[in-house]
């Protein structure tokens, strides 16, 4: 049961809109529809109760009138009944259509529900109490199917002077109440009348077009006003999200406006304070490592001078090599800290031109680099981007003898694949090579193999640009390094 509930919950969450604005609109729609449904249910219940009370009183009055009519015809001699009926027809204007038939006229009974049950029960109860009649037929008929006399003539076929116009209310055509009671042997009193209750058996009266239109107008009005309000609320959040994305690229970006609702303004204040603290910590880290590097240069230089004074050539060479290694480590640590120039401006750069420049520089050192593919200009920090590519291409040349670079460009992102022809990297070691001072080839000296900071600095720069570096062994041998950087939307800038 719990697992089924979790699955249903996950499906529900996946079906929700992905944006805050969409979820707010969905909540408003559900809330408005729920409120309208609840109010409509209460209103319908009250109207139905009121209508039943009205119908109860009206049907009792008509039932007493029918009982009086029946009592009157009972008191008439048989030969006078038709004379009275002719007089009634000639008078017109009566609420009842009355006839005396030799048998019960079949009626296509219509309607159902509590309204009809209330009318039928009232007629039977009152006629039974007033006239002691238990065999009474109370039915409802449509005007177009109502039959009146022994010959079952239709209501619409009767002459107007016979009073049938009192039962017709074009174009409403309400149902007609028909009461038939036995006056005597082979003699039935036929009474037809209208109940002046609108839409008595109309099942769709509660959902009329006017009510649906009114509900739709209310819903559209609430949604429109909600969209305006939600837009004003979510705009600062979108601006804050853009600021957070830009913060990784430029710590010197202008601060957010600390305006708007209290919660939004408080969040903007906290964001600006966070940006200030990050800038202070980064600057402090750079100053610290710069000071350490500067302070170590003097003792290293002094030790190198003393090492030159050693008499033993072998010891002198070993001592100088250790000092060179120490100097390289200090410079590498400082380079790791300053791996990304936080104060560099964003510019449009031609990736292939940068790679061609790097290939030319490596060719002078004996490195072989081949290029394939083209790319549109990319908005990045030029020196940082060049250093990222330089670390990756140099690493491929030094460890894999030659590098094959392929550019794959699209509207969303730029991918640069760099393949070497070296031994590759085991899958378990691929994440480890990004750590500082890690080299998987211990036989290489630091003078020829670097300090193990190249990939770490390259990943740091790539992530600062919003991209990523992935490693994989090529099926035909060698390591395949893929640098993927998203393209920036020119309109996706901070609005301060």
Image (spheres, helix red, strand yellow):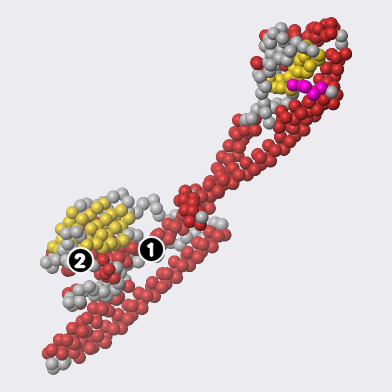
Q: Residue furthest bottom?
A: 311
The residue at which mark 1 appears reads as: 248
Whether 136 is among the magenta residues is yes
Query: Where 108 sits versus 357, above or below?
Result: above
User: Residue at the location (23% across, 58% down)?
Assistant: 417
Where's residue 243, x and y in %?
A: 43, 59
Asked if residue 262 can be seen in this view, the reply is yes
Query: Where 46 sits versus 142, above or below?
Result: below
Image quadrant assignment for residue 84: top right
- Identify the mark at residue 289; answer none if there is no mark: none
Where's residue 426, x and y in %?
A: 23, 67
Where's residue 265, x and y in %?
A: 53, 60
- Identify the mark at residue 424; answer none if there is no mark: 2
User: Residue at the location (38% across, 63% down)?
Assistant: 248
Left or right placement of residue 260 versus residue 415 in this view: right
Where's residue 335, x and y in %?
A: 28, 73
Instruction: Tell me where the magenta segment starts and ends, as one range.
Output: 133-137
Left or right placement of residue 271 versus residue 404 in this view: right
- How packed mark 1 is, by other alpha carbons closer than 10 Å (few <14, some 14-19, many 20 or more), is some
Whole-number angstrom distance, CA of label 1 to CA of label 2: 31 Å
User: Residue at the location (65% across, 15% down)?
Assistant: 144
Q: Nearer the viewer, residue 472 or 438?
A: 472
Label 2 sits on a secondary structure element that is loop
């Amino acid at each position: 049961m719990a697992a089924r509930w979790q699955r249903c919950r996950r499906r529900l969450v996946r079906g929700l809109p992905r944006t805050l604005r969409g979820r707010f609109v969905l909540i408003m729609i559900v809330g408005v529809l729920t409120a309208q449904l609840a109010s409509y249910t209460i209103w319908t219940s009250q109207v139905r109760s009121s209508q039943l009370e009205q119908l109860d009183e009206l049907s009792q009055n008509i039932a007493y009138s029918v009982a009086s009519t029946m009592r009157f015809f009972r008191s008439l001699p048989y030969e006078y009944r038709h004379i009275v009926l002719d007089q009634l027809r000639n008078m017109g204007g009566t609420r009842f259509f009355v006839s005396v038939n030799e048998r019960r006229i079949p009626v296509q009974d219509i309607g159902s529900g509590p309204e009809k049950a209330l009318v039928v029960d009232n007629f039977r109860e009152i006629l039974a109490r007033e006239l002691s009649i238990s065999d009474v037929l109370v039915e409802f008929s449509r005007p177009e199917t109502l039959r009146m006399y022994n010959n079952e003539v239709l209501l619409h076929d009767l002459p107007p002077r016979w009073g049938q116009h009192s039962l017709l209310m074009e174009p409403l055509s309400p149902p007609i109440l028909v009461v038939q009671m036995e006056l005597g042997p082979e003699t039935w009193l036929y009474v037809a009348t209208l109940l002046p209750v609108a839409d008595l058996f109309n099942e769709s009266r509660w959902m009329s077009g006017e009510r649906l239109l009114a509900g739709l107008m209310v819903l559209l009005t609430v949604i429109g006003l909600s969209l305006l309000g939600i837009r004003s609320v979510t705009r600062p959040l979108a601006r804050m999200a853009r600021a957070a994305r830009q913060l990784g690229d430029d710590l010197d970006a202008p601060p957010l406006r600390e305006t708007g609702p209290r919660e939004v303004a408080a969040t903007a204040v906290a964001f600006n304070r966070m940006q200030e603290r990050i800038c202070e910590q980064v600057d402090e880290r750079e100053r610290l490592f710069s000071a350490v590097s500067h302070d170590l240069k003097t003792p290293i230089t002094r030790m190198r001078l003393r090492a030159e004074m050693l008499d033993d050539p072998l010891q002198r060479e070993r001592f100088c090599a250790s000092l060179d290694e120490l100097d390289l480590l200090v410079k590498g640590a400082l380079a790791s800290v300053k791996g990304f120039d936080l104060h560099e401006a964003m510019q449009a750069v031609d990736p292939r031109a940068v790679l061609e420049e790097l290939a030319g520089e490596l060719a002078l050192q004996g490195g072989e680099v081949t290029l394939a593919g083209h790319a549109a200009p990319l908005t990045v920090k030029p020196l940082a981007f060049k250093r990222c590519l330089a670390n990756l291409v140099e690493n491929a040349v030094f460890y894999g003898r030659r590098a094959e670079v392929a550019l794959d460009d699209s509207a969303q992102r730029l991918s640069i694949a760099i393949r070497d022809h070296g031994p590759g990297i085991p899958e378990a070691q691929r994440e480890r090579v990004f750590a500082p001072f890690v080299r998987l080839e211990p036989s290489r000296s630091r003078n020829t193999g670097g300090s193990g900071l190249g990939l770490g600095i390259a990943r740091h720069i790539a992530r600062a640009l919003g991209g990523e570096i992935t490693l994989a062994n090529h099926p035909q041998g060698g390591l395949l390094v893929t640098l993927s950087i998203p393209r920036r939307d020119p309109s996706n800038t901070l609005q301060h």
